[in-house]
Amino acid sequence: MLSKNSLLAIEPRILCMNTPEHVREFEVLLKDDSVRVFDQYEKMLKEYILMDKPTLINNKYLFETEYKKFIVNHISNKKNIMYCGNWIYYKWKNTLVHCLEDKYYYVLRTTRNNNLVTRDEHKILKNINVGVIGLSVGQSTVITLVISGISRYLKLADPDTIDASNLNRIHAGIDAIGQRKTDYLAKIIYDIDPYTKIKLFPECIKENNINDFLLGGERLDFVIDTFDDIKMKFTLRINAKKNKIPVLMCTDIGDSAIIDVERYDIDQGSSIFNGRVSNIDVEKLPDKMSYEEIAKIASVIIGQENISKRMYESIKLVGNELSGHPQLGLASFLGASAIVYAIKKIALGNKLNTGRYHINLDEIFNQ
């Protein structure tokens, strides 16, 4: 279910300078002394020209000549350069930002990806739809997706608000404490790319909204599982399998990360959780489980052999000497990068089978 009030307060207003009513709205905002104005439009244009004609980088005279010709054509019949492109109004911070139009901004913003990612590949990657449940490790994943230019349509689900103890593994400041994780992440995304489409689920994903999450609005191409509700993890996979949507799960454990890939899009015969918990009766699992009950099933999913001694000993202390499940920021970001790599690989048609991929830093650095 979409949090309309929440998203309406965050979603930026895009004012197109080719639309008369948007121009009038822009002029009203511009006259408001309380509105902060940020205009680096010409700097972006200059970058765009150099991106398009990189041979001008080392010839200042030719570049200035080219830029003057470009500006004349760019402004055309507009009043001045302020009436070119788009202005983005961020209501939640009362700020106007001058920006290139969407198609130009995306190309410029991702230009340093070339040719590690080609322009044709970018066209594919930007148009995939990704849903993320759980915005701790999930937040790192979403930010990595967005800055990489992957997915312009996101569904984000998490019922929690940000605690001070979350700041060891999520990108946030002190002033974020108490804010919904969904809302705060939406602000980060819109700051990076105001043209991204976002649908928020600031409540638990349950039976009554799982289909809306997977299929409502735009059908998801990928689901990323980074949440704790064991019973819903099963339900998610049952529904994703039925709808042929791949599920990727990141588990951060100590200094390492495990990526589980379930290719329900191409492998309908694959077992949920790669068959690791096939003997568990999902229907008999309680809706609310204790930390010990969750940890017991999670250890089967993860595999005892993948849990370091220090991690294992720490888990036993939760609720007695430790107030929460131990996690490290480096493992969250490690897992996030791996998930994004896997999505990129699958989306571009490269082979990546159903299976488990363990990134164990202890093994890598102790060789």
Image (cartoon, rainbow, N blue to C red):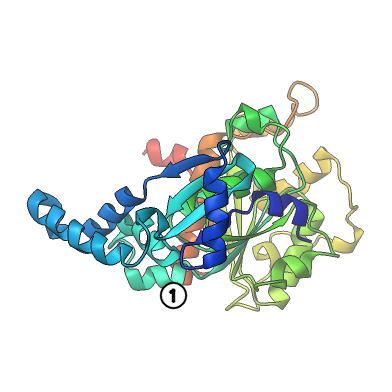
* 17 is higher (above) or lower (below) than 243: above
As helix, strand or loop, the secondary structure at mark 1 comes to loop
Q: Of all residues shown, which one is farthest toward the top?
A: 321
Task: Answer with the quarter of the image where residue 199 lies.
Answer: bottom right
Looking at the picture, tell me which residue is in the foreground, 187 or 310: 187
Task: Answer with the quarter of the image where residue 75 lies.
Answer: bottom left
Residue 9 visible in the displayed image = yes
The residue positioned 59% from the left and 30% from the top of the image is 173
The residue positioned 73% from the left and 65% from the top of the image is 213
Residue 255 visible in the displayed image = no
Percent position of residue 265, x then y:
60, 76
* 194 is higher (above) or lower (below) than 208: above
Looking at the picture, tell me which residue is in the foreground, 42 or 358: 42
* 215 is higher (above) or lower (below) than 361: below
Q: Which quarter of the rendering shows the C terminus?
A: top left
Looking at the picture, tell me which residue is in the foreground, 219 or 263: 219
* 106 is higher (above) or lower (below) than 33: below
**In the image, 233: left or right of 120?**
right
Circle 1 residue: 349
Q: Residues within 10 Å of mark 1 (few under 14, many from 20)?
A: few
Disc 1 marks a residue whose amino acid type is Gly
**In the image, 270: left or right of 128?**
right
The residue positioned 74% from the left and 58% from the top of the image is 233
Percent position of residue 96, x then y:
51, 46
Looking at the picture, tell me which residue is in the foreground, 309 or 292: 292
Percent position of residue 298, x then y:
72, 48
**In the image, 279: left or right of 28?**
right
Q: Which quarter of the rendering shows the N terminus?
A: bottom right
Percent position of residue 227, x then y:
70, 50
